[in-house]
Image (cartoon, grey):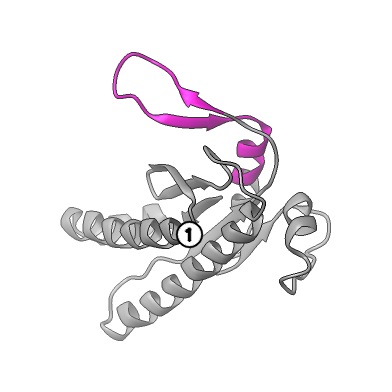
Amino acid sequence: MFTDFKDFSILAEQMSTKELVSELNYCFSTFDDIIDKYGIEKIKTIGDSYMCVSGIPVQKSTHALDMVLAAMEIVDFMQNYKQKRLQKNKQAFEIRIGIHTGHLIAGVVGKYKYSYDVWGETVNSASRYESAGEVGEINISESTYLLIKEYFECTSRGLI
């Protein structure tokens, strides 16, 4: 799963450095709490993007279901937080989320500042699903849909 904030650069220019870092920390710390509840592995934040995976390092049959449930909680959190910020006449982040299911490679590379990371088509596709997503929505791939369709009502966006 990838998340990203719409128009982050524009909003960042309108906030003080302290407020921007505080907002990112608050949102990403809440995301951390949500994914932890579902046994999802945070990989990293990349600027205003948040990247996590389910089903590694320990495989589990509910990986796609867990990821979608976490994504739904993140969307709910962001919508509620946006309303609170707007009531105070403050700028608010809006989120896009992309999820793709497939094989990937995981590990640690390099000499300094070790970081567990993931690579492969699955990672690239999840990023593209986020980029092609709509604000406040969860954009999933067909492979994810096939694993979760019995549990959620999904709307096809057609070929994108």
Looking at the image, residue 153 sits to the left or right of residue 88; the answer is right
Please give the residue where the numbered disc 1 appears in the rendered image.
6
Looking at the image, residue 137 sits to the left or right of residue 42; the answer is right
Give the residue at the far left of this rendering: 18
> Where 22 sits versus 131, above or below?
below
> Where 75 sits versus 50, above or below?
below
The percent position of residue 145, horizontal first and vertical second, equals 76, 58
Is residue 68 something that shows in the picture?
A: yes
- Residue at left 34%, top 24%? 114
* Dot 1: element: loop
Residue 16 located within the stretch drawn in magenta: no
Looking at the image, residue 51 sits to the left or right of residue 125; the answer is left
The percent position of residue 67, horizontal first and vertical second, equals 58, 57
The percent position of residue 49, horizontal first and vertical second, equals 44, 48
Q: Magenta span covers which residues?
A: 106-127
- Residue at left 80%, top 57%? 146
Is residue 135 something that shows in the picture?
A: no
- Nearest the camera: 108 or 26? 108
Give the residue at the far top of this rendering: 111
The percent position of residue 65, horizontal first and vertical second, equals 64, 60
Under mark 1, the amino acid is Lys
- Nearest the camera: 65 or 88? 65
> Where 90 sits versus 143, above or below?
below
- Residue at left 28%, top 81%? 89
Q: Residues within 10 Å of mark 1 (few under 14, many from 20)?
A: some
Give the residue at the far right of this rendering: 159
Q: How many marks?
A: 1
- Residue at left 79%, top 53%? 142
Residue 107 located within the stretch drawn in magenta: yes
> Where 4 sits versus 155, above or below?
above
